[in-house]
Amino acid sequence: MIHQCNIHCHAIDPTRLDLLNIDDKGKWLPFLFHLDIVIAAKQTSDEQDEMTYNCTTVFTEHGDTYVIDTPYYEFFKKWTGFINPTTETNIDDLNF
């Protein structure tokens, strides 16, 4: 299954930004990927003033990490439905 969203990108590597004391908030660009590459995901930020608030960080089997604009709980439902289509996951039953 293909997931279409936006991906958060930086012109300069974020680790270099810190070293150079440069402020680059990045930008959102269109992105799509197949859900079978995902091995884990987490909520990117719970800070409302962050650009990535309530977004999802996706970890792939090849070691890549992406920040996407899909809200974490929405992505969680889609991904768990993809990896186990016979079991319906009710996010309200989970303890977050």
Image: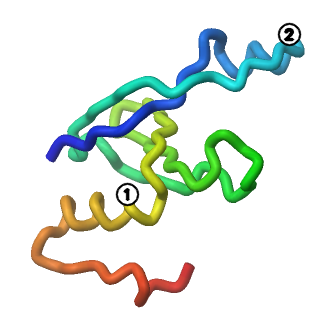
Q: Between disc 1 and disc 2, whose residue precedes?
A: 2
Kind of element beneath mark 1 = helix
Considering every residue shown, the one lying at the far bottom of the view is 93
Q: Residue at x 44, y 42 (%)?
A: 59
Q: How many marks?
A: 2
Q: Position of residue 26 (x, y in %)?
A: 63, 22
Between disc 1 and disc 2, the foreground one is 1
Classify 69 as above or below 7.
below
Q: Residue at x 54, y 22 (%)?
A: 9
Q: Work out how far the residue at label 1 is from the one at label 2, CA to CA, in angstroms.
A: 34 Å
Residue at mark 1: 75
Tags 1 and 2 in contact by the CB under 8 Å rule?
Answer: no
| Residue 79 x/y as whole percent | 29, 58
Rendering coords of residue 3 (x, y %): 25, 43
Quadrant containing the C terminus in the rendered view? bottom right
Which of the 4 image quadrants contains residue 12?
top right
Name above or below for residue 1 compared with residue 85.
above
Number of other residues with Cα within 10 Å of mark 2, as a class: few under 14, some 14 to 19, many 20 or more: few
Relative to 85, is 13 above or below?
above
Give the numbered dot on residue 20.
2
Three-letter code, disc 2: Leu
Q: Residue at x 50, y 49 (%)?
A: 56
Q: Residue at x 46, y 40 (%)?
A: 68
5 left or right, relative to 95? left
The residue positioned farthest toward the left in the image shown = 86
Colour scheme of the rendered structure: rainbow
SS type, badge 2: helix
- Amino acid type shown at disc 1: Phe
Packing grade of label 1 (10 A; few <14, some 14-19, many >=20) is many
